[in-house]
């Protein structure tokens, strides 16, 4: 039972701001926003939505493969994925580009401000899932270039392959029609409570309509856990309590990996 992952592969540059963003943003000056946050740490990690989910699936012993473009700096990352059991044969290396990179600043309340350089990911729409779908039990369409997300959810739908639609950070970039198309074709719709509010506002669908839109709808609620809606049944899942909270980046992707492995 293989999971086919469409989504970003990227490097995350994680910065920690030792204060609170809200203390430095003046609500009445948002139209001339000009702020700088002095961070006290900077670390570089392997990331991207498909990379994070795939690595966790590998740790759980769940077969998976990634279809995505990367840059000429990807060799060490590929080795790490392969060592975890991830099929990387369908990853496309673009020799004259760098792998996508996220620059994430987190404050003491776990609020985040992110900048993202797409790099090779900007050509994700050129990559087809055709030729990789055979034998796949579940697809995942997660944040990457918007044209790739639309292409891949159509290819999965046309092949009658069940897929998880996880629009996440690309809700802003996707058109209302593209969001509705992904929701209508998906077997699983997943996002956090803020993302669901954004989807509702952009598509004109109510929260009740979204909850009933797919066989499985999952809303994550941070430290409050998550809620799974399935065929009129609601299941409240408490959060797994960590021994220490270091940084929330990637927590949602780890959740998605556990969800997929559990369903399969």
Image (spheres, rainbow, N blue to C red):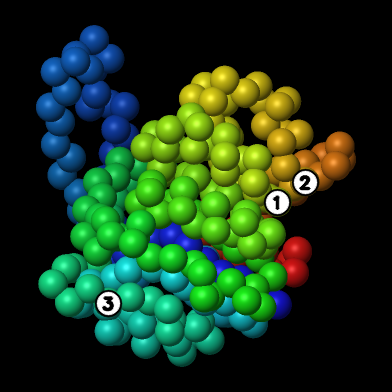
Residue displayed at 12% across by 27% down:
34
Question: Contact (CB < 8 A) between labels 2 and 1?
Answer: yes
Q: Earlier in the sequence, mark 2 or mark 1?
A: 1
Does 58 appear above or below 49? below
Residue at image mark 3: 93
User: How many residues crowd around disc 3 within 10 Å: few (fewer than 14), some, or many (20 or more)?
Assistant: some
Q: SS at mark 2?
A: loop
> For this view, does 250 lie left or right of residue 210?
left
Local packing at callout 2 (Cα closer than 10 Å; few below 14, some 14-19, many 20+) is some
Residue 191 position by quadrant: top right
Q: How many marks?
A: 3
Sequence-wise, which precedes: disc 2 or disc 3?
Answer: 3
Is any atom of residue 253 visible in this view? yes
Q: Nearer the viewer, residue 204 or 54?
A: 204
Q: Which residue is mark 2?
A: 215
Residue at x 24% of width, y 10% of height:
28
Name the foreground residue: 137 vs 228: 137
Residue 253 in the image: x percent, y percent? 52, 59
**Considering the image in quadrants, where does the N terminus appear?**
bottom right
Q: CA distance from mark 2 to mark 3?
A: 36 Å
Left or right: 12 with respect to 65? left
Q: Is residue 43 visible?
A: no
Left or right position of 117 against 242: left
SS for dot 1: loop
Residue for point 16% across, 68% down:
97
Give residue 187's mark.
1
């Amino acid at each position: 039972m293989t999971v086919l992952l469409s989504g970003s592969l990227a490097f995350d540059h994680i910065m920690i701001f030792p204060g609170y963003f809200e203390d430095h943003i003046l609500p009445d000056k948002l139209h001339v926003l000009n702020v700088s946050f002095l961070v006290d740490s900077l670390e570089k990690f392997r990331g991207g939505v498909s990379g994070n989910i795939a690595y966790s699936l590998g740790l759980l012993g769940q077969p998976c493969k990634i279809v995505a473009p990367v840059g000429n700096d990807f060799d060490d990352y590929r080795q790490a994925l392969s060592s975890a059991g991830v099929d990387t044969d369908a990853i496309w290396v673009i020799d004259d580009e760098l792998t996508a990179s996220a620059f994430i600043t987190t404050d003491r309340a776990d609020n985040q401000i992110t900048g993202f350089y797409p790099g090779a990911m900007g050509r994700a729409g050129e990559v087809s899932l055709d030729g990789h779908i055979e034998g796949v039990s579940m697809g995942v369409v997660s944040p990457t270039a918007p044209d790739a997300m639309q292409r891949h959810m159509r290819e999965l739908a046309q092949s009658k392959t069940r897929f998880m639609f996880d629009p996440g950070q690309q809700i802003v970039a996707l058109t209302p029609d593209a969001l509705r198309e992904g929701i209508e074709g998906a077997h699983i719709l997943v996002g956090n409570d803020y993302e669901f509010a954004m989807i509702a506002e952009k598509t004109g669908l109510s929260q009740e309509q979204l909850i009933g839109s797919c066989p499985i709808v999952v809303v994550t609620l941070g430290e409050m856990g998550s809620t799974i809606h399935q065929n009129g049944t609601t299941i409240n899942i408490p959060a797994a309590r960590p021994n220490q909270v270091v940084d929330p980046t990637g927590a949602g992707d780890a959740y998605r990996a556990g969800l997929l492995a559990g369903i399969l």
